[in-house]
């Protein structure tokens, strides 16, 4: 006797094609390495669905808008499709579209990071014996040790 719910029922297969849990969608489209990291980000308020905070179990459907704070970047994505599996990166990128505002913001931030890296002093690595002696002598002249 079929109840309409469960693993092999037609109802659950149709629903899976239309929507997917938020944490699972984030994992499938390769925005997070593990599903538990995706769930932790949602619970921590780093992921907003359609302008509001949600739980990891909330279902995502095509047309929804996500705002994600990910590694110092603020992404704004439109859900384009629901992936059938966690596949290769090109397949995952086809499941979402970044908004033009978000792309422009990313380009500006990239330029700021590039300019910032040019203004930072660079090093050839660890100082050798001669460099260490010079550094110690400089410190002594400046009143250090």
Image (cartoon, rainbow, N blue to C red):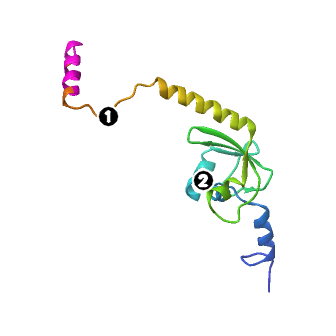
Horizontal side, residue 127 vs residue 40: left or right: left
Give the extent of the magenta segment.
131-144
Residue nearer the viewer, 80 or 3: 80
**Residue at 23% across, 22% down:** 135
Q: Position of residue 33 (x, y in %)?
A: 55, 55
**Residue at 23% across, 17% down:** 138
Instruction: For mark 2, give the secondary structure.
Output: helix
Please rate how many residues cluster around mark 1, counting C-alpha atoms within 10 Å: few if below 14, some from 14 to 19, many from 20: few
Instruction: For mark 1, give the secondary structure.
Output: loop
Identify whether 121 is placed above or below 40. Answer: above
| Residue to which mark 1 is pinned | 125
Identify whether 131 is placed above or below 140. Answer: below
Q: Position of residue 129 (x, y in %)?
A: 19, 30
| Residue to which mark 2 is pinned | 38
Horizontal side, residue 110 vs residue 133: left or right: right
Residue nearer the viewer, 104 or 6: 104
């Amino acid at each position: 006797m079929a109840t309409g719910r469960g693993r092999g029922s037609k109802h659950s297969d149709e629903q899976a094609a239309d929507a997917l849990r938020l944490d699972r969608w984030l994992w499938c489209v390769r925005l997070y390495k593990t599903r538990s990291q995706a769930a932790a980000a949602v619970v921590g308020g780093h992921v907003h669905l359609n302008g509001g905070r949600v739980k990891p179990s909330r279902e995502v459907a095509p047309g929804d808008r996500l705002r994600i704070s990910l590694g110092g970047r603020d992404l704004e994505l439109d859900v384009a499709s629901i992936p059938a599996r966690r596949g290769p990166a090109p397949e995952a990128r086809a499941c979402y579209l970044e908004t033009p505002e978000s792309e422009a913001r990313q380009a500006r931030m990239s330029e700021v990071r590039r300019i910032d890296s040019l203004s930072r002093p660079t090093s050839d690595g660890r100082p050798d014996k001669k460099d260490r002696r010079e550094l110690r002598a400089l410190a002594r002249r400046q009143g250090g040790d």
